Amino acid sequence: MSLSYAHGTGTTALLGDTIGRNLDRSIAAWPDREALVDLGMDARWTYAEFGAAVDQLARGFLGIGVAKGDRVGIWAVNCAEWVLVQYATARIGAIMVNINPAYRAHELEYVLKQAGISVLCASQRHKTSDYRALVDQVRANCPDLRSVHYIEHGSWDVLLDAAPAVTDEQLAAREGELSCDDPVNIQYTSGTTGFPKGATLSHHNILNNGYFVGEMIAYTEQDRICIPVPFYHCFGMVMGNLAATSHGACMVIPAPSFDAAATLRAVAEEGCTSLYGVPTMFIAELNLADFASYDLSTLRTGIMAGSPCPVEVMKRVVSEMNMAEVSICYGMTETSPVSTQTRRDDDLERRTGTVGRVLPHVEVKVVDPVGGVTLPRGEAGELCTRGYSVMLGYWDEPEKTAEAIDAGRWMHTGDLAVMREDGYVQIVGRIKDMIIRGGENVYPREIEEFLYAHPKIADVQVVGVPDERYGEEILACVIPRDAGDPPTLEDIAAYCSEQLAHYKIPRRLEILGEFPMTVSGKVRKVELRRRFGAAGEE
């Protein structure tokens, strides 16, 4: 009997650099190659120019008194300044705190206070959010906040104008004080109840994770990565930015926030070789009326992650977007984020039916959620991971850290998984999302995968809702391909009857125009349960 345990081996050693020193290596190796392109600003930087801009901002931070360990908040949509703040704070040993662009006043206030943010870098506004007004609303309640610098505003110039007072030698002296094990980033996980927790990540955590994610899809200085996913999430700033700079590749920002047409236009115009996205982003791109008009011939790879990847969508990405080496990644913010990944030479079954196998220098195991015992391969249990990628802890919350990371330094993910005999991992759901119908455990992911192939269904989410007889009943929330001809519950039942056990067949159906989403592109299943759960109790 093989146990559900795997240790990722590799011939490439972990990087011992800080992020700043690693960037210096890329600048020295490829000074004239493009490092960053921001199409929204119509601006681009070579590695030498990018390094100079990072150093200017780093000296500006030092000039206004940012000390090692100070928290610097970044509250902005995707733009070049976001990337510059990421690398400049790493240069000086400050801890960058990512703030979700969708936050409203009470969430902003909580993060500013909980992290003790002293300097905030922010957009002025985006869509319906007036960031300046929101900051003004909460600032009196945030005593640690010393200064706010708005991008494309005079207050940003104040930050840059402080740079000349700081010499290159002073910047180098600060950088010489830093260790790769120092905290460099706090990311707030999107909790479904209560306030989010601040996952605290080190240089070692995120630099290595970005580097090895890039290694798995063979990044070199020839690659150009289109990054439409938000920087405030690990997907953008680690798997995107750090994977790029650790390999001398180019970061391409197609737009401030996701826009399907702008993304494909960026790929075509910039000759991108790699494209990132959550499944809903790829679905939106594939469904563009003029999809066939975009030249995607330069693409070879990319990453689909953030939520379960539908088999049918993955097949279309491979065949219609030329992404033959596309990879699926699995992880969580607390693990920097990636623990498992499919490889570029994996067959279609592995790249559509699994989330890959463990990354080099990382361990994973599947355990009984109650007893904690490692299960035999093929049995479903909670996925745990251990290694360089596990966070330092939740910022200033040791008790919550202890709930997530056990005495053996295993991070408990809360995800239900099966490790196959070949070591590849299948995610079958969240422990909290698992439906218990009449004593039978039902995994929504299995039903969703099956229904994605239904000819009338464009997208589907399955949730459990209260039921007097069975405890929980299965609800399919469907976005139809044709709003004028949606599937009926009878259609779905008939479609499932020959392939799924009777207790897995949805007994309720809701036709929707869109799903409630987080900013990072994940469907809010908790909102679907809340919205439609009451109807099941009537």
Image: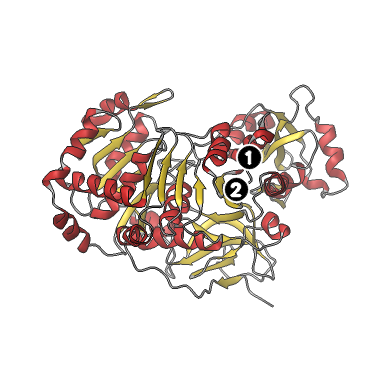
Question: Label 2 belongs to which residue?
Answer: 298
**Residue appearing at x 11%, y 45% in the figure:** 165
Q: Quick one: label 1, few (<14), some, or many (20+) residues within 10 Å? A: some
Q: Position of residue 33 (x, y in %)?
A: 41, 52
Does 359 sit left or right of 282 as displayed?
Answer: left
| Residue type beneath disc 1 | Asp
Does 68 sit left or right of 355 as displayed?
Answer: left
On-image quarter of the C terminus: top right
Asked if one can make out residue 221 in the rendered structure from this viewpoint, the answer is yes
Q: Position of residue 432 (x, y in %)?
A: 58, 48
Query: Judging from the image, what secondary structure is the residue with disc 1 in?
Result: loop
- The reply to whether discs 1 and 2 touch (Cβ–Cβ < 8 Å) is yes
**Residue appearing at x 74%, y 30% in the figure:** 481
Q: Quick one: label 2, few (<14), some, or many (20+) residues within 10 Å? A: some
| Residue type beneath disc 2 | Thr
- Of residues 267 and 426, the one nearer the viewer is 267
Give the colour scheme shown: secondary structure
Question: Label 1 belongs to which residue?
Answer: 295
Does 221 sit left or right of 294 as displayed?
Answer: left
**Where residue 409 is drawn, which disc sits there?**
none
Label 1 to label 2: alpha-carbon separation? 8 Å
On-image quarter of the N terminus: bottom right
Q: For residue 263, which quarter of the picture? A: top right
Query: Judging from the image, what secondary structure is the residue with disc 2 in?
Result: loop
Asked if one can make out residue 177 in the rendered structure from this viewpoint, the answer is no
Q: Position of residue 162 (x, y in %)?
A: 15, 41
From what the image shows, is residue 351 above or below residue 516? Answer: below
- Of residues 8 and 16, the one nearer the viewer is 16
